[in-house]
Amino acid sequence: MISAGTSTGTDPQLIRSLQAAYGATAQVTGRTEAEILAWFDGLTLAAPGLTDVWAWRPDSPLHLVRPLSARARFLAGVACKRATIHPRRP
């Protein structure tokens, strides 16, 4: 399970501000949506796949509403390893 801020759709000035504010104590990296999706290579993504956090479970009673205006974008995804079928031993 991953949730991560992404540079895709995030205000570049916000990323620069976070890097300036926290750069001495923590690394702030703006990764693209494609880079975050690559973290799931070799895994099976659960529905709805990699998506905005606010859109993760639209049928849930705890569903978040899409923000009208946001400077930052956060993505979430859940995946599992693909099942491996081992041949039976005689």
Image (spheres, rainbow, N blue to C red):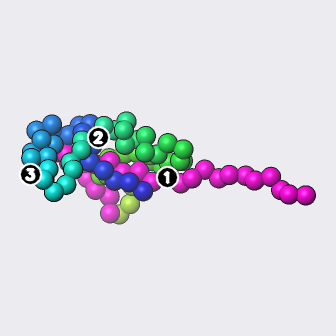
Q: Nearer the viewer, mark 1 or mark 2?
A: 2
Residues at badges 3 and 2 in contact (C-beta under 8 Å)? Answer: no
Which kind of residue does numbered mark 2 sit on? Arg
Q: CA distance from mark 1 to mark 2?
A: 19 Å
Q: Nearer the viewer, mark 3 or mark 1?
A: 3
Taking the spot 49% from the left edge, 42% from the top edge, the residue there is 41
- The answer to which of marks 1 and 2 sits earlier in the sequence is 2
| Label disc, if present, on residue 2 of the rendered structure | none
Q: Quadrant of residue 16?
A: top left
| Label disc, if present, on residue 79 of the rendered structure | 1
Q: Horizontal and vertical percent for residue 10? A: 20, 40
Label 2: state its secondary structure. loop
Which kind of residue does numbered mark 3 sit on? Ala
Q: In the displayed image of the protein, which residue is found farthest to the bottom?
A: 61
Residue range (magenta): 62-90
Whether residue 55 is visible, yes or no, is no
Taking the spot 14% from the left edge, 46% from the top edge, the residue there is 19
Q: Please name the predominant secondary structure of the magenta segment in the image.
A: loop
Placement of 80 over or under 51, stated as above or below: below
- Label 3 packing within 10 angstroms: few (<14), some (14-19), many (20+): few
- The answer to which of marks 3 and 2 sits earlier in the sequence is 3
Any magenta on residue 70?
A: yes
Which kind of residue does numbered mark 1 sit on? Ala
Q: Dot 3 corresponds to which residue?
A: 21
Please identify the quadrant where the N terminus is shown.
bottom left
Q: Horizontal and vertical percent for residue 74? A: 27, 48
Placement of 49 over or under 32, stated as above or below: below
Q: Dot 2 corresponds to which residue?
A: 31
Label 3: state its secondary structure. helix
Please identify the quadrant where the C terminus is shown.
bottom right
Placement of 45 over or under 63, stated as above or below: above
